[in-house]
Image (cartoon, rainbow, N blue to C red):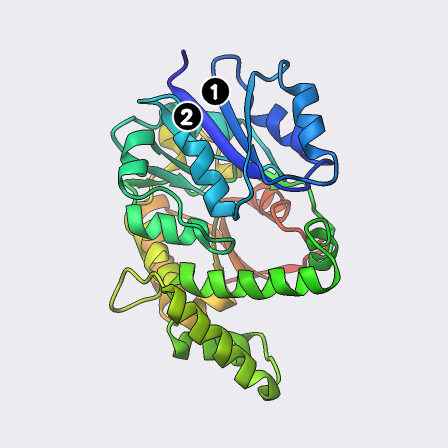
Amino acid sequence: MSNICIYGTVYNNYNTIEYSIKSIWRPDYVIVITDNYSTDGTWEKLQEIKKEYNLILYRLRSSRGKGRDYSLRHCPDNSKTSFFDLDVEYNENFHRITEWSSLDKITYAHWLFIGKKEYIVNKGGWRDLNGAEDVELINRIGFDYYIPVIVGKSIYKGKATKERESRYAHGTKLLLRNINNFIDTIRGCGFNWREVYNLYFKYRRIHYSYLPIILGIYFIAKLKRIYRYSSLHDNITNSFLERLNKLTLPKELNIPDDYFLFGISRRDLLLYSDLERLADIKLKEKIGDYKKFLCSDSLIRYVKNSEGLKKALELSNLSKIECHELN
């Protein structure tokens, strides 16, 4: 049996699942998927393609984190594991990184977190969260290598957030889902009240009349437990600093420069204003020359060339983004 297990969870992704599965499939991989009782034909589609892709399938009513954890625990013992998202189409770098990674180390890249099953499970596995579950896991477990490359692209490119979210719920159920996701995001990111206030009233510019609601949501998050793993920083900032410290050159994996990508969002800078300066210094030290772009989606993108920027923009769900190069 293969020692590589790719696992994930899914809910109402009928239109994307086969593209995603096909992109990560290899004859010797074990693929474990937990379906959260989809209502759009996803489960039936998975049954239909089960033999073609050697899928191991389960059903469980769960959050995204709990579903991933359930799938992880059903991977073969002593296997090298990585989660995957079933609305992402992965490229060859997914396989390069997965196969390059060693069983006794943790390797992290965007949309990838590779490690031995038992190590991750013994550290507690995935939390029962439906927002920032990956941020929480990365901070709690840590990683040995960060590979700053593009491993895939969103299949929902060009779809508005509301349109994408509507596949999960509608009306009151969608509102409750969004509130729960908000609570889980606070918990998984390890935000304190100052960070929540800055993010939602300064960054997102929510009207101050919503202050009692946001405050109430924050206290619910506190009651449920906020997972913060650094006394100095929230989990997003903490993992950002760790990525800079543990950055591994793509050329070590024979990945072309076109796929190099390192990004900073305006949200990241609001949480810790020194990130851009630190990234400028560290990236120059480790990768040499790069091109730096500020884009209309409030992201700063570090790439090696113009083709790299083109590939980087394919990661976004937005259909049109304008960028200008920074000196």
**Residue shown at 52% from the left, 46% from the top:** 64
**Residue shown at 37% from the left, 56% from the top:** 240
Q: Is mark 1 on a helix, strand or loop?
A: strand
Percent of width and height locating residue 51 = 62, 14
Choose between 173 and 200: the one closer to the eye: 173
Choose between 200 and 77: the one closer to the eye: 77
Percent of width and height locating residue 9 = 54, 38
Q: How far apart are marks 2 and 1 (CA)?
A: 7 Å
Residue 191 visible:
no
Percent of width and height locating residue 90 = 57, 32
Q: Of the residues under marks 2 and 1, which one precedes in the sequence?
A: 1
Percent of width and height locating residue 30 = 47, 20
Mark 1 = which residue? 30
Which of the 4 quarters of the picture holds residue 155?
Answer: top right
| Looking at the image, residue 134 lies above or below residue 17 | below
Which of the 4 quarters of the picture holds residue 274?
Answer: bottom left
Which amino acid does the dot numbered 1 rest on? Val
Crowdedness near tag 2: few (<14), some (14–19) or many (≥20) residues, C-alpha within 10 Å: many
Q: Which mark is residue 75?
A: 2
